[in-house]
Image: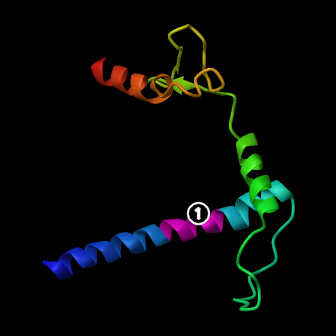
Amino acid sequence: MHGKSSTNVMCANSFTNDIFFCLQNVILYEYLPALLNEGLEPYNGYKPDTHPGITHVFQSAAFRFGHTLIPPGIYRRDGKCNYRKTRSGAPAIRLCASWWDSEVCIFLPILLSLLC
């Protein structure tokens, strides 16, 4: 029994690593070059004398940059790919108006779709 569960964990970890490495590959070699309009240097191997951390300045800038990529609203579609209107008749859920109300974005639409 123990061997079977540890095999499942190893398989899950392997799957998680595959997803992580695939995502890392897409970000490094597709997204960043398109964003920066220039390619990255090829990987030259591990350098033990290079500090692996990032500065607080870079961390803060990256956090703020990521938030600029969030759209001001979310458009939802029904099963036939038509845009769904909100309860107030607006074409999209405005994130600034519903930031603290998770029922508007997540719970209520899922519940309504299960009931209809």
Residue assigned mark 1: 23
In the picture, the quarter occupied by the N terminus is bottom left
Q: Is residue 79 visible?
A: no
Q: Is residue 15 left or right of residue 92?
A: left
Nearest the viewer among 101 and 20 is 101
Q: Position of residue 113 (x, y in %)?
A: 35, 23
Q: Which residue is rendered at x = 63% and y = 20% of the image? A: 97
Question: Is 40 part of what is drawn in magenta?
Answer: no
The kind of secondary structure element at disc 1 is helix
Q: Position of residue 49 (x, y in %)?
A: 76, 91
The main secondary structure of the magenta stretch is helix
Q: Residue furthest front?
A: 56
Q: Which residue is rendered at x = 77% and y = 62% of the image? A: 56
Q: Residue furthest left?
A: 1
Q: Is residue 27 left or right of residue 65?
A: left
Question: Is 21 part of what is drawn in magenta?
Answer: yes
Q: Is residue 86 left or right of residue 68?
A: left
Q: Position of residue 18 (x, y in %)?
A: 48, 71
Q: Position of residue 2 (x, y in %)?
A: 17, 79
Nearest the viewer among 29 and 9 is 9
Nearest the viewer among 66 and 34 is 66
Q: Is residue 67 left or right of residue 9?
A: right
- The image shows residue 7, relative to residue 25, as above or below, that is below
Q: Classify residue 14 by image quadrant.
A: bottom left
Q: Which residue is rendered at x = 41% and y = 69% of the image? A: 15
- The image shows residue 102, relative to residue 14, as above or below, that is above
In the picture, the quarter occupied by the C terminus is top left
Q: Amino acid at mark 1?
A: Leu
Q: Which residue is rendered at x = 81% and y = 71% of the image? A: 40
Q: Which residues are magenta?
A: 18-26
